[in-house]
Amino acid sequence: MVLNIYATFILALSSSWLLLRPVVSAEEAGATFFHAGDDALSWDSDELVRTRNLHSKDFSDKEAFMSAPSIASYLGLRRIEALHMPVPLSIVFVGFDGDGNMHVKLSGEELTRWFGHLDHVLPHTRVELAELTCAEDGHCTGLITPGQTAPPEPVPSYVHLNFSCNVVQVRKQSVVAAFERAIHTFSRPVDPDIETGAQQVDAAKMEAFVDNFVASLGLAQFSYTLVVINPTWSISEPVYGYRLGMSQPELDTLMLGTDRVLKLMNNAHAPEPHPPQPHGGPSYLFRGGAAPRHQTKKFSSTDAQWDSERWVTGISAYLDEEEAYRKNLLKEVGQGRGAAAVVQAVRLLRRGDVAMAQVLKEELLSPPDMATFIYSKFRTSHPAEDCLVGNWVGHGRWALVDLTSGGFDWGPALGGDGVVHRHSLPSVMERFGSVAELRKAFHDTSKTGHDEEVASKVAAHKTQNVATATNRAYQAFLIESQREDRHANAPGAPEPEHWEKERQAKERDQKWQRRYQETVLKAELDVYEEFALRHCNDKSGMTPRMACSEMRTQAVKARQLLAKLASAQVTPGDVWRDHKWDIFGDEPDGTEDWGVADASERAHDMFLGELTGVLSRALRHVVAPPTATWTHAAGHAHDTATPYAQHVRFVIHVVSEVTRARSEYAPNPAASAVFDVAAFQEQVATLKLAGQTFDFQVHRTALGDDPVLATAFAAATRTRALDIPSSDDIVQEAERVYVDSRALAHVLRQRFDTPEAPAAPAPPGSLEAAAARRARRARGRGYARPGSAPVNGSATHATHEVPVFVFELTRDTAVLIDGHYNAKPLEDMVLVVSNTARDDEHPTGMMCGGALLARPLSPLKEALGAVLTHLGGVLPPHLGYDPTKKRVTHDWLWSVGSHPQSFTSVGTRYSDLQRDALARAYALDGLDSAVDAVNDGIAALAHVAPSKLSQLHFQLHAGDAREMLKTYAGLLDAWRRVMEAAWSLDWATAASLLPGVEDGALRFRTLAEKLATIPLNGQCAGSVSGTTEHLVLPMLIASIAVAAAALVHLAWPLVSGWRPPAQSGLGYSKRGSKGGGYF
């Protein structure tokens, strides 16, 4: 008996010792892939060679197996910490070689040094969409109480976006001169009455111009591009900005003269000029400048001077055509107030496929009674008056940052972070203005006698030349006026009224004033150029540098004034001379004076610091913004709104309403709430990748024909009071009608038999959470249902259905979704409301130029943005992740451009940046899900301690171990190919690899879990979990205590001689008898 007890004690002790073997620490550093070196994507890189050879390990080495902390460590597997996805980035600086505003000069060494401070490695983040309130997405129309909503917590990703920076060098002077000419050619006055005042540049024409520039440099298909320009501009001149539509003064002028618009529209004209086709490819690609596909150099520089000069030659001819085309239109309009505005309106109206053209058509060419429904009692901008901005995001893969444009403001009307103001972009004029003054003072004190002599001759010759030119111009003007008078007084000509004569006299006087200004400016330019050619390029060293510098400054100012006059009215050419301003010689930088040099160096450092911050924010908001996730599913918080599907079916339900007046003033019968389904389908179809198919089904019904749906819609309708800024600069309370999205969606799911939305997430790490995750991922792709057989990666990526419900409401009061939205994405559907009511009682919460932005008359723009968010969680560009604060922030500087997610302009076309963001979201979802599965398998192996038992099990399944390691190596190669496709911006290839990636990850986890299972007593038990380690020591102590107590109990009678007393009664007195004693 004693031997049996001792055997039990030894067995318990040995079992506890086996369980107490050390396991890998959870704090061990994880593995990071594709981040080190220029050849990080090469399969021959060091980190991938080691992984590729893991399966060749000798599994018969018992000593190595027993000495490893865990099976995962023995196999050389570590938890994956991060995957680095390379993002190609090119930055083009124009006007920073001493040829731009304030003669700022940035060397390549300075740029390389400063761009090292860029956030060039950003962890991709996701935002829980349920946490994005209207205060976050910018749709709030009323007052938001501070602290009412907490900022959303970012959901991290395994994938880190690793930006590579390529600085592109372009030709000095000629490129910046082409940009300056384009700005003047496409500009017109903001106020038609002030022709030399603030200017607005046609954003559509400027976008085509920059598109051609980026494509000609070979950057359109190979990288994302930030174009930073610094065109020359006088500090005393009014500012300019970019606008797609019209200004309010222009609209006021047009409303008083729509006949001029109609007349010009009816005239036959040649089509608008278009930029030339970009050249076949950049020359530096054929000169060894392009790196191999797998190389991702962190910082590089590309010499594109020859390509940029070739581009200047072609684009100059295009600008000639633009100037001639505009000049002809201005001639037809005639010399009158708002001629440039009329020309711009006609050009917009002829671009029939542009959303702004539709707005103008409704306003200018529709019956007058329809236009009255556009305006609001609030200080709200006209729908055609979008914001005047200083930067622009195009439909290509580029963003334009203009550091010379004026400081404008826009953002949430009632405050918040990220609001744009005049200091949001670094100002070259303000930063280097003091340096320019010091340099001018130094130049004044450094003037030589030769400088004084040349300056005196220039002043004298300018006076003489201006007098001669103006006299000659006045004589020509008199002859022209007399010819007009003879024509007006010819026999049979109608006698004009008195007021008509006064108007004609006023116009003639204004015409002469413009002619006089043009003549003076041209005469001054002629003098400056004549003396520059004669004195400023003297090879003998006798160049009067200070006088030449002063002439250059005066020539730039005269050129800008002349260009403004040319953009407003019909003006002869000769504004842009062929010499490109290099005739004035080199600009003296003042470095020979220590005071100027010191101020210049400090200004450079401060300017580059500010510019670096702006470019860092551009990466976080424009190039790679965060995405949305619907739920923190099942312990793994790495799901975008909808995973990638090879077939997407959009089921569009258009629900109309029977017209019924709800007040004594019925809505305009000519107004229509019809949603443009065809335009919606056309744009959504552009989101599909190669290999994807999009199908559209349209079903129409009416609330009057469906009592259940009509009742549900009425039950989901709510009212609320909102505090909205009024025209009196006070907050005014107003009642608003809206529909509750959750209540309406619940009925729609039942009525149209759509899949249920995902339930609230289960506790992370629970079995319910894991099951919910698997079911949701399969169900989200439209295949597996709970309880069905498991499917592989290819099947789960097969199809996805997107229900879109459009409610066309013909009411006199606009109805929005949740009080703020025309369209809103939900977990399993997209809701859209199209209103007939045009009285803007629901202004947006955005403001620019002192006015609330009007809500678009059509919900198409917001519907397209909602689809983008539903498919891949793509968020508006004003949302970004700040790694220093570790939270989601706002920067409204990047909410520009003509696309569905821009708040400052009308746009119903997706940009390439948005398409890439959607495709990248697909790839990120697949990669994160695969890493989750791989880490689950590695964690199972890491919690198994090597032992004789586990070694025996491992030897029996050595084939599975080798297959698992080969699967792991193949999975890393698949990840590498996804990253390589992302580096090449080949998102179709990246998406096609996702099913295989998921198959490999699931196969690896299955094999890892099989190897982590230790057989005990002939039965398969579960793998040893690290959560039971804390029970081992108490069990061991308890076993020792029980064994010791048993030994004491047995030994004590033998030592002490104690015997149990004899029992009596009932025949139980003898041991071993019936009902006997202890033994």
Image (cartoon, rainbow, N blue to C red):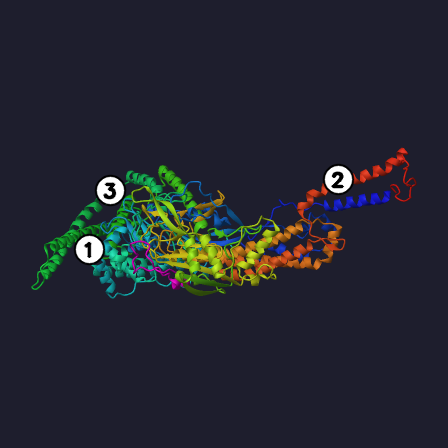
> What amino acid does circle 3 point to?
Glu
- Mark closer to the observer (3, 2): 2
> What amino acid does circle 1 point to?
Gly
For the question of whether residue 821 can be seen, the reply is yes
Give the residues in magenta. 656-683
Q: How many labels does the image show?
A: 3
Kindly identify which residue carries mark 1. 336
Residue 1037 horizontal side relative to residue 698, left or right: right
Judging from the image, what secondary structure is the residue with disc 1 in?
loop
| Residue 961 location (% of width, % of height) | 68, 57
- Whether the magenta-drawn stretch holds residue 676 is answered as yes
Q: Do the residues labelled 1 and 2 touch (CB within 8 Å)?
A: no
Residue 59 horizontal side relative to residue 348, left or right: right
- Whether the magenta-drawn stretch holds residue 474 is answered as no
| Residue 859 location (% of width, % of height) | 38, 57
The circle on residue 1037 is 2
Quarter of the rendering occupied by the C terminus: top right
